[in-house]
Image (cartoon, rainbow, N blue to C red):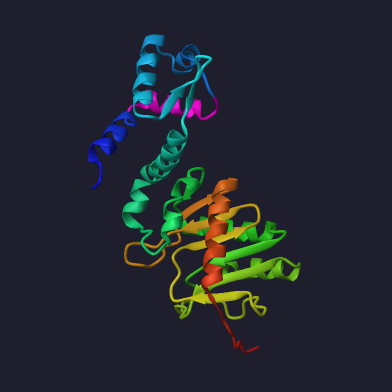
Amino acid sequence: MVDMQSLCDLMFELSNTDRVRILLSLLQGPENITGMSKKLNTTTQETSRHITRLSDIGLVSRQPDGTYKITSYGKIVFNQVSGIEFLSNHKDYFIEHTMETLSYEFVSRIGELKKSNYIGNVMTVFQKIQEISDEAEEHIWRITDKRLNIIYPNIQKAADRGVEYRRIEPETVTESPLIEIKPPVDPGTVRSLESVPVFMAINEKEVGGLAFPRINGEFDYLGFTSKDPQVLKWCSDIFKHYWSKGKPKVFNYKS
């Protein structure tokens, strides 16, 4: 049985802005009441009251020297709160888009996307993918539901200068006016899944585009970009996970 009271108590304590600010401060290292009071611009009595509440629920603990630190439990909880924060900041997007087809291990790590930036214009997304293709030095990895002609020339130039190009796509690719007639394909560089859970384009330094499917399963290519290492790792891990599950794809393009 779920301990609803414990969960409600935790959520209540995290609903206070000052208590969340205290936890954010303690993530940087132990502090005393006076130091935290100055950061929060509150009285020592008010800060002490918040610390007591956080201690009672197990999120912080007092050190022998009188300072306070966030507990291991507190760090784990706050890591999960980061995911809620990310979703809350992009509420309108996730009302219209879904993660239901994504492996749970990545949904549980969604807080790692906190330092990404939303792009609400599809042409800006494609332009960003062109840019990361031009700037790639090691690799370009894509997960896509379509072969998009608009970015093909940039990917071809990258492949010509020795950049590794890998792509994951559905077993059956939807035909569209944006189809790549002759993409840069070498043996082993394209694998297929029954369907793809995200749309994504990354190089070794940057996430050029990350988009989740709409509720109806289709992609509108609106989503996120970032140079943050944690965001890039989340996307890289997704690509490697699904690459290992994909089947090598054979192409018979006519010249």
In-image side of 249 versus 108 (left or right): right
User: Compared with residue 45, is residue 195 higher up or lower down, i.e. above or below?
Assistant: below
Quadrant of res 45: top left
In this view of the protein, can residue 148 be seen by the observer? Answer: no
Which residue sits furthest front? 64
User: Compared with residue 242, is residue 97 higher up or lower down, i.e. above or below?
Assistant: above
Q: What stretch is highlighted in magenta?
A: 16-29
Residue 75 x %, y %: 46, 36
Q: Point out the image quarter for the C terminus.
A: bottom right
Give the residue displayed 43% in from the left and 41% down from the top: 82
Give the residue displayed 52% in from the left and 55% down from the top: 124
> Residue 17 in magenta?
yes
User: Compared with residue 9, is residue 176 higher up or lower down, i.e. above or below?
Assistant: below
User: Compared with residue 96, is residue 17 higher up or lower down, i.e. above or below?
Assistant: above
Residue 37 x %, y %: 45, 14
Q: Nearer the viewer, residue 230 or 251?
A: 230
Magenta-drawn stretch, dominant element (helix, strand or loop)? helix
Residue 227 x %, y %: 59, 47
In-image side of 133 versus 14 (left or right): right
Question: How many numbered markers are drawn?
Answer: 0
Residue 101 x %, y %: 39, 64
Which residue sits furthest right? 161
In this view of the protein, can residue 255 be seen by the observer? Answer: yes
> Residue 116 in magenta?
no
Give the residue displayed 56% in from the left and 68% down from the top: 150
Q: Which of 200 and 148 is in front in this view?
A: 200
Q: Nearer the viewer, residue 64 or 209?
A: 64
Give the residue displayed 56% in from the left and 47% down from the top: 230
